[in-house]
Structure formats: C-alpha cells, structure tokens
Image (tube, coloured by chain):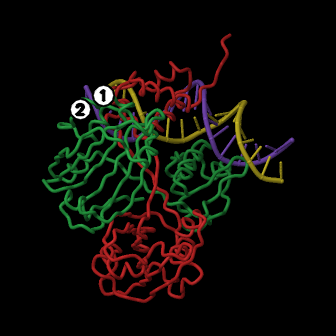
Chain colours: A green, B red, C purple, D yellow
Amino acid sequence: MSKQERISWQAVQNEVRQRISQRDWKPGDFIPHEADLAQELGCARATVNRALRGLAEAGLLERRRRAGTRVTLNPVRRAEFAIPLIRAEIESKGQRYAHSVCLREMRLPPPDVQARMQVPANVTQLFVQTLYLANGAPYVFESRWINMTAIPAVRDEDFATFSPNEWLVREVAFDGGDFTFSAITASSDEAAMLSCRAGEGLFVLDRTTRHAGQVITSVRLVFHPGYQMHTRI
Amino acid sequence: MSKQERISWQAVQNEVRQRISQRDWKPGDFIPHEADLAQELGCARATVNRALRGLAEAGLLERRRRAGTRVTLNPVRRAEFAIPLIRAEIESKGQRYAHSVCLREMRLPPPDVQARMQVPANVTQLFVQTLYLANGAPYVFESRWINMTAIPAVRDEDFATFSPNEWLVREVAFDGGDFTFSAITASSDEAAMLSCRAGEGLFVLDRTTRHAGQVITSVRLVFHPGYQMHTRI
DNA sequence: GAGTGGTCTAGACCACGTT
DNA sequence: ACGTGGTCTAGACCACTCT
C-alpha cells in the first residue's frame, strides 16, 4: 500500500503558485480544470476549488464558468491598508497620545462638502478641528464635518475625553467610505498648526464615511511632515 | 411536507450581519457555535463555516479554536488599493500615454538603496529615470534601481517601446513587495521634471518588489501636483 | 446544448488553545 | 483532556456562459 497523504488546499495553492512562478503556466494560459487537477494532485475537487478560489481573490487567476481558469495577464497588484484609530497608531509606536479640540461650531458647509455629504444647502452642520499629538508634537490636524441630522447625539459632545475620531467609532456604526490620498503644500495656517514651515509638502487623507446610505462624516487629515504610510503585499 | 429550501452561505452571512448590525449580537459577544447555527438555520456546518470565515476575513468576527467566535470589538477598517500599470492608469482616464527615458546607466546604489535591495555594497546596479506623460503633460517621474544579478536580461533593454514599469511586469514574476506612501517638497530638479514650481507638495510612492526571496527592483514614483489616489470600502 | 466553476451536504478526522 | 473551529472527502446539483 502506498501511504495515503492528505493534500491541503494550501499545498495545492503552493503548487499552483510555483507553476505560475516558474512559467510552467504563463500569463494568459488556461490551466487544467478543477477535476483534472484534483485527480493529478490526488485530492478532492473541493480542495482544488478552495485553493484556486483563494488565488483568484488574490488576483493571480481569473475564473469563469464554462470558460475555465486562466493565469491573469496583468496581475492587478493590490495593497491593503489598515485604517487604525489615530490613538492606536500613535500608541503602537510607543508614543504618548493626546488631542486638543481647536474649534467646534455649527457652520454652513462649503459646496464641495455639501455635495460629498449629500446634505441640503441651507442646513448647518457640526464642524470640528482637532490636533492630535504624539509625545507632545503635532501628529495630524483634522478638520471634520459631522452630519447632525444623522447623528443628533453629537450635539452634547465636547470631545474632551474621546476625540471625534474615537467618539464616532464607538458610537456609530459604519458600513462604507471613500478615501482619497494626496499631497498638499502647507499653507501658513497649516504650518502653524503642525509646527512646520509654510510650503512644506504634507500628506493628506480625505475620508467620507457612510452608514445605511447616509453620510456620517467627512474629514480631512493633514499629517505632519515626514509622515509615511506603509503596506506590503 | 415543508418545502426544502437551500440555504446559501451568502444568506447565512446576511443573517449574521443583520444580527450584528441590530445589536442582537454586540461587539465582544460570543456568537453560537457553528454546529448550533447550522441546526438553527437548517444548513450544513460547512455552509456556516464558509459564511463565518468570510466575515472573519472581513474583520467583523474573530474566531479561535476552542474559544469560539466573537464579534470584533474595534473592527479594523481596511482599504484596498489597486496598483495599476502607469500606462493603464493614464489610458483609463482617456488620456494619451507616453514615456521618455531620461537616464540609463550602471551606478553604485546609495547605502539606503543597497539595504533595501539586499545587494553587496561594491556592485553597480542599473539605474533608470523615466518620465511618464499624460496628454503630453508630466504625470509621474520614476527613479528605478534594477537588480542586475537577478535580471541579467535587462542589460540589453533600452525601454524605448516598453517602459521599465511595463517591461518588468511582462518579463519578470513578482511575489511580494513593500509600499510606502508619503509627501515631499519638490526640489528644483523634481520641479523641472514635472513642470511645476519648486517647493510644491508632491505625492510619492516608494516600492520595492521581490521574487523568490530576491529584490527585483526598487523604485520611487514622484507624481505631478494634484495627483490623487482613491479607494473605497 | 454542454462543459466548467460554484456551491451544498453529511460525515469524518484533525489541530490547537483553553481549561 | 476536551471542545471548537479548520479542513478534507465524495457525491450531487446548479448557474452561468460559450459555442
């Protein structure tokens, strides 16, 4: 009797990855059908399916019913970023977290914010500006609009113990959002807030957060000079 | 006879999502075991497993053997970016693509690049600078180091028809990489390349690409002023 | 129409972490 | 130790899509 070794779906993935990597199967090629692969590798078709599905999710394969499975021609490289709480980001670097609310008032949003938030033109919303500090040094400057219609409870919140960022994460459920990353040239105001020179290049994240079809909040984060965002495939 | 309806794993996911969303199961709570859920919902345990695994991957649940499954306390928000070919990115906006190689020479990498590329200190590598254009206007300026030991075939390539970006994607397999996003203040050289003023804030992507444990290439992309990178959850 | 991936089932065994 | 999630199997049917 030959020993019966169980083939894991990870083993199948590795095998397939290798064949692709070694150009056994080239970009654009069709690879064998699930049933054939299962027989060749000595495992159930479900195991092959599990393996190939993972590779397809990773963008390495393209699968279509009836047509078959092929090696992706131009693998779209995808990078995934974790979007942590600012507090968590600072404390994970071993630095001391603090925040200070600079401004908190009801205000009429400018047209672009009205559009992003899908709110009526003549209704004021809550506008909060907050500076976040790491070891006492400016880390990121936040300008945030909060939809008062969607989140009426925010009316009585002064964000002293919980920053707008934390408060919203704790109190409100999210289910979607848009992110835009860009670079700006620091204005004198921004330079003053972040204790840097006017004219420096600053990393910016604009985020709009939704829940149940409503926009909850729209925020711009301007990071200190030298800030970096990392990820890895 | 009651009609036998098949329960899909998506249906199970929706049910679970709803119970979490309705605070039926609150953050931190343990949810029923797979076997119990399967019986309650009238499907196989494998179906429940498929559903819960997906929610765990999405960060909504935390699963541990023996301990059970609980609703994640502070769901980590994740954003996924597609990293397209520069040509594809430009052409997808309906703009005309072009590139021009400004510099191509063997050169000793500076220490930080040596470290990133894990190459010996006294070996020259290929250094290529390329400007990418959209409708004739500077789009992104690329400074790239290519590991000649790993990719000897690049010796005879002048990147006239295929840019370094495209050539490498076509000729070399990747299996990993590091990405760093940041903002810089344009130097006069960079300003000249990108036809902008010195001192402007520019969006920068540093990328190091690996294959089979070797570093293939290390590249810095400096984008034109106003460049934005979008994503959505 | 027919072939391929997508999914469900019922049962079984295993790995691992909690106790 | 023991219980829970993790996985594999063999078989079946279905959905989609290409010809």
Which amino acid, by three-letter code, is at mark 1?
A: Ala
**Mark 1, secondary structure of its residue:** helix
- Give the x, y percent position of residue A46: 60, 41
- In the picture as drawn, the residue positioned furthest to the left comes out as A136
Q: Residue at x 30, y 61 (%)?
A: A228
Of residue B27 and residue B88, the one placed in the foreground of this image is B88
- Give the x, y percent position of residue D11: 69, 33
Q: Are marks 1 and 2 in contact (CB under 8 Å)?
A: yes
Which amino acid, by three-letter code, is at mark 2?
A: Glu
**Mark 2, secondary structure of its residue:** loop
Q: Residue at x 57, y 63 (%)?
A: B93
Lateral position of residue B198 relative to residue A119, left or right: left
Q: Are marks 1 and 2 on the same chain?
A: yes
Label 1: few (<14), some or many (≥20) within 10 Å? Answer: few
Of residue A92 and residue A32, the one placed in the foreground of this image is A92
Spatial separation of the CA atoms under disc 1 and disc 2: 8 Å
Q: Residue at x 54, y 50 (%)?
A: A57
Q: Chain of mark 1?
A: A
Q: Tag on residue A157? A: 2
Of residue B200 and residue B158, the one placed in the foreground of this image is B200
In the displayed structure, B182 sits above or below D19; it is below
Q: Tag on residue A153? A: 1
Q: Quadrant of the C terminus of chain A?
A: bottom left
- Give the x, y percent position of residue B110: 30, 82
Q: Residue B7 is drawn in which quadrant? A: top right
